[in-house]
Amino acid sequence: MRYAARRERLRATAAERGLDAVLVTDLLNVRYLTGFTGSNGALLLRADGGDVFGTDGRYTTQAGTQVPDLELLVDRGTVSALAREAVLPRSGRPPARTIGYESHHLTVDGLRALESVLAEAAAGGTAPELTSVRRAVEALRAVKDDDEIDALRRACAVADAALAELAAEGALRPGRTELQVGRELDARMLTLGAEAPSFETIVATGANSAIPHHRPDSTELRAGDLLKLDFGATVDGYHSDMTRTVVLGGAADWQREVYELVAAAQAAGRAALAVGADVVAVDAAARDVIAQAGHAEHFTHGLGHGVGLEIHEAPGIGQLGAGRLAAGMAVTVEPGVYLPGHGGVRIEDTLIVTDDEPELMTLTSKELLVL
């Protein structure tokens, strides 16, 4: 079972760090390791096995269905109850002395609650310790397994189909507003099988297209404008991410010039995706194309990011990134050139890093579309 295999990877991490147990409290990490999709759940992963899943009474039936292979602990104070099970086990097994916890997720009050449980155990004669395993599960999530890649592939297909249908039906036309287009794109993705949009859909026309993360408003689409669409679909919890920029009516020379520049940069970034590639070097491969054309100051964000259970996750591909790419990583490549007051172009794909060429997941044409 894929969840058991994922837990074994975390167990190996725990062993490397000398931990007796790990408390996983971030709900997306819990979902990744167990399959549970409810709003309250946590996992006690033991280095020697015998993991325990915790939730409250609202989810007893759901947990039995989604997490049938783990011991279930039902308690409204889920995290504290699991911590108590680690240091004061009911089964007679040795108590955990070193416990990893997700410091990037737990609140101050949550940490104090854990410390209270540990103090209770110390009063009984043991002296357990807490140690941060900050983003250890996220590091595992950066490399996707076959099931995850399949979900990503289906999420990308939904987004591709939604845009194709809107374009074919003439929905991207002068006189409509950004909000109307965005809402229709979202609705079409839901109709095609998405659970939800991956994020707030970006529809930016005219001068608004020069704002990288413009929020759609009542601005009307006009002939001669650039129209930037950044959107994605969520399928089985996994997110797709794609940006296409089109022109309404005839394209001006400057629009074609900027589009061709971004397309060249995007192609260079895609070509740089290789196992072992430094993420800073991947960013530079695309950024240098734009800088050499005199538009360095008009490319204001990183080249890309990982996608999966979150729309932005490891690895980050940018000038401040760190690390190297590995086979199975799902990433975006999304350079842009933004000319304030005039318009901007971004072209973005979701891809899978492989031992050969990267697998392109978002298949909508990147030729400049004039509608």
Image (tube, helix red, strand yellow):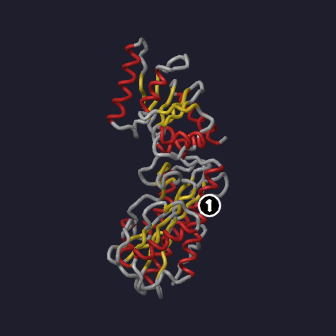
In the image, 347 versus 37, the foreground residue is 37
Q: What x and y, as percent, mark residue 61?
A: 56, 41
Query: Residue 35, located in which quarter of the rendered image?
Result: top right
* Residue at 48% in and 81% down: 172
Q: What x and y, as percent, mark residue 123?
A: 37, 14
Query: Residue 160, located in which quarter of the rendered image?
Result: bottom right
In the image, 63 versus 141, the foreground residue is 63
Q: What x and y, as percent, mark residue 357?
A: 65, 58
* Residue at 46% in and 26% down: 99
In the structure shown, which secondary structural element does the residue marked by tag 1 occupy? helix
Query: Residue 202, located in which quarter of the rendered image?
Result: bottom left
Q: Is residue 365 above or below residue 236?
A: below
User: What amino acid type is highlighted by mark number 1?
Assistant: Arg
Quarter of the N terminus within the rendering: top right
Residue farthest to the top, as pictured = 125
282 vs 360, left or right, is left
In the image, 193 versus 49, the foreground residue is 193
Q: What x and y, as percent, mark residue 316?
A: 47, 51
Task: Look at mark 1 in the image and give the residue it sits on.
Answer: 154
* Residue at 61% in and 65% down: 157
Numbered disc total: 1
Mark 1 surroundings within 10 Å by alpha-carbon count, few (fewer than 14), some (14 through 19), many (20 or more): many
Q: Is residue 315 above or below residue 251?
A: above
